[in-house]
Amino acid sequence: MEANILRQIFFDKNSHWESFKKKHGAKIRPIVIKEVEKFRDCGDIKKGFKLFVCEGCHDVRKVPYRCKGRFYTTCSVGESEEWSRLLTEDVLQVNHRHVIFTIDEGLRDVFLLHRHLLKD
């Protein structure tokens, strides 16, 4: 049994991700498809790896490349921490709250056509 539960859900023998894409493909944003596809290949040694060799005992380790995608929490945690560290250096040293607003799916097309509405 594979350790990663997300990979089990998305890419098991039932092909849930492919079925979902087929059914809802027109509604899925391209960035979402890109991130999930990156996640599919994350950690696959066939897609590339770094080779480490110990000079003392000559032990060889192949470490697969990671996707560093936003979808996969294992890969995105390090990226998020680095981003927040850099951000804290740039932001004024005052108490603040971080709030994220999303746009309802039904309104996304309107805002994509009229991006100037988002600037303020």
Image (cartoon, grey):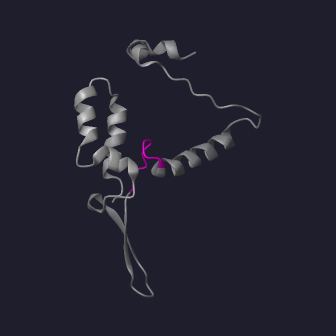
Farthest residue, direction right: 94
Residue 111 x/y as whole percent: 43, 15
Farthest residue, direction bottom: 57
Residue 19 x/y as whole percent: 23, 35
Q: Residue at x 40, y 14 (%)?
A: 106
Regarding residue 25, the answer to whether it shows in the image is: no
In-image side of 68 versus 78 (left or right): left
Q: Residue at x 28, y 39 (%)?
A: 17
In-image side of 76 versus 89 (left or right): left
In the image, residue 66 above or below residue 110: below
User: Looking at the figure, which quarter contains the N terminus?
Assistant: bottom left
In the image, residue 75 above or below residue 64: above
User: Looking at the figure, which quarter contains the C terminus?
Assistant: top right
In the image, residue 33 above or below residue 66: above
In the image, residue 46 above or below residue 82: below
Question: In terms of depth relative to the viewer, which is nearer, 105 or 46?
Answer: 105
Residue 119 x/y as whole percent: 54, 17
**Residue 109, quarter of the rendered image:** top left
Q: Residue at x 24, y 38 (%)?
A: 18
Regarding residue 35, the answer to whether it shows in the image is: yes
Q: Is residue 42 magenta?
A: no
Residue 75 x/y as whole percent: 46, 51
Give the residues in magenta: 66-73
